[in-house]
Image: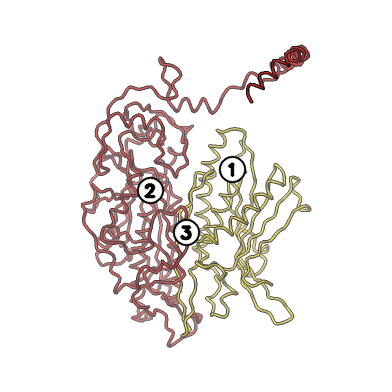
Amino acid sequence: MDTDLSSQDRKDLDKFIKFFALKTVQVIVQARLGEKICTRSSSSPTGSDWFNLAIKDIPEVTHEAKKALAGQLPAVGRSMCVEISLKTSEGDSMELEIWCLEMNEKCDKEIKVSYTVYNRLSLLLKSLLAITRVTPAYRLSRKQGHEYVILYRIYFGEVQLSGLGEGFQTVRVGTVGTPVGTITLSCAYRINLAFMSTRQFERTPPIMGIIIDHFVDRPYPSSSPMHPCNYRAGEDNGAVYPSVEDSQEVCTTSFSTSPPSQLLGPGKEGGVPPVPSQPAHGTQADQERMCTPLDGVHYSAATPSSSEDTETVSNSSEGKSGSPHDLLETIFIRKVGAFVNKPINQVNPPDSPETESPLQGSLHSEGSSGSSTGNTHDDFVMIDFKPAFSKDDILPMDLGTFYREFQNPPQLSSLSIDIGAQSMAEDLDSLPEKLAVHEKNVKEFDAFVETLQ
Amino acid sequence: MVGPGWTRRRAPPGAAPTMNCRAEVLEVSVEGRQVEEAMLAVLHTVLLHRSTGKFHYKKEGTYSIGTVGTQDVDCDFIDFAYVRVSSEELDRALRKAVGEFKDALRSSGSDGMGQISLEFYQKKKSRWPFSDECIPWELWTIKVNVVNLANEQERQICREKVGEKLCEKIINIVEVMNRHEYLPKMPTQSEVDNVFDTSLKDVQPYLYKISYQITDSLGTSVTTTMRRLIKDTLAL
């Protein structure tokens, strides 16, 4: 079966598939970190950017992926899966998505490995970047921190979709044919949770009943542990993971200009450039305004957690008070102190999850210690307080009710046609009288103006 | 409330300008202030797939490819986020085109209807005295219908609905990209400007042009204004 594939091509293909798998995991996990990702383009290739895409390698993630793969590659019946799940601060968890990298038997013998397969894998990674922002879990992951966190788990073998509940949907990211089989990348995701978080006005109380089914403490099918997508200091065991070894894993960056059908002796593709000196991005003057502070170095230094943590600490700020704008709040029945379980309108755009309202600020002083983000949340204390928009002391109104009333205010009485017309007519009639009075008092007015100057 | 929605239609084969040009049509109903972000989301997603790193040709007839960075963009008026290529030049060019389209839509009256097209083409050199031919190989058309909403509640629902529809559109775009249909052959150094736009300093999209058309409120195309923004590296 493989007689048509040269050994060099076979080696290249295996390397491509391996690094494609690793990059796939990086893209998926980074898309669920809860923050915006930003990497710089570089016109000069460094040899370390696989598939000509700037995708940062988070060492822990690479480590986990390699552990799961255990030296194997995705093959028929052996798929690489990344499971994304949500875990509440009470310890309940729910699977949100399963991303599958599979291989089937359909081979494309004619395809050129170092050229076409490589470029198509690059295209597939771009598609993955686009699709990871489009499934419901993306919006959930951007709001993680207070009530829940997003976790990932990598496993290798049979795909297990049972944890996604009924009616899950599948989206195909893409396929790439190779001489040894067709690589397929797809995602199966739960949909009912998404329905709830986007319909503020149509939510009904029975939702709580449905959700409780999903919060089941289940043993994991395999022994691989879950990992948080946002690298809290306490939850990491503090191990330092080796950065991706790059000495023998330099990626192909040279291509032949000749069309694939022609043979070119000296210009054979797959030329390995010299080991890159990093970073090569210093020459790039590109300024990305909205960039999270990535320094363009793709192989992080020995303590990766620290940089991630400073970025995420602000995201997952002191968890006790929780955000009144958190849409998932209604799902968790626990009475969080002064917060009432009513759907609360999303005031802020999704990209500012850490905005603090005056409410939150006042609660903060009530006794939340500066707990480290790694600890599980302490018990909530019932705090009696008067919300800022309360109508009167007897009937405290919550923010949600106030906002709904504010959104649909009654018509102003002076604007209603009949009353308006009446008062207008009256005004017009009384005008001459008023003018006469004012004219008499002209001198007084002038004197007043003098005093002002 | 007028429901915002998107549909995707494949243009019938006879409508394609040339034999090899595939055409995709997307339709959208959005509120006025969402036009810009919705257009940028679609155009950037297409260009993400149709841009490579900068080519560097070497003496032996090989070339190496630079690296394409990406970044997340959050929309302000739509519950949606998308990924674009990290290139300020490219972003500026798209924003300029979309801004002009939006202004034209606005000035056409309250029943804003129009379409914006992104066309990828190849240049074919002709001998003197004939000028170079531009042969399109992929055409994306986004038809826009601007709706007016009465109150904040409707606007909020529109935010979400358009966000959901955009998600569907991204999936559709990726589906088309995944078909691995015709792409221009990788060019030699002398031919690279006939296939790619090499004017940007950090990325290299395929040669593209953006054009738009506004339909007046009567729906007739007699008074349509046609403007083209040409992104050629070589002026004709």
* Residue B198 as seen in the image, left or right of residue A372: right
The residue labelled by disc 1 is B4
Q: Find numbered disc 2 in the image and state the secondary structure of the residue it sits on.
A: loop
* Residue B20 as seen in the image, left or right of residue A18: right
Q: Residue at x 39, y 68 (%)?
A: A49
Parent chain of label 1: B
Marks 1/3: CA–CA distance:
36 Å
Q: Find numbered disc 3 in the image and state the secondary structure of the residue it sits on.
A: loop
Q: Amino acid at mark 3?
A: Gln
Marks 1/2: CA–CA distance:
28 Å
Which circle marks residue A34 in the picture?
A: 2
Q: Position of residue A199 (x, y in %)?
A: 47, 36
Which circle marks residue A277 in the picture?
A: none
Of tags 3 and 2, which is closer to the observer?
3
Question: As drawn, which residue projects farthest toward the bottom?
Answer: A265
Q: Amino acid at mark 2?
A: Gly
Q: Is residue A157 above or below residue A33?
A: below
Q: For label 3, count other residues whose C-alpha is less than 10 Å away and answer few (under 14), some (14-19) or many (20+).
A: few
Which circle marks residue A287 in the picture?
A: 3
Q: Position of residue A27 (x, y in %)?
A: 38, 58
Check the picture and name the quadrant holding the C terminus of chain B. Answer: bottom right
The answer to whether any part of residue A61 appears in the image is yes
* Residue B163 as seen in the image, left or right of residue A228: right
Q: Find numbered disc 1 in the image and state the secondary structure of the residue it sits on.
A: loop
Of tags 1 and 3, which is closer to the observer?
3
Q: Amino acid at mark 1?
A: Pro
Viewer-proximal residue among B72 and B11: B72
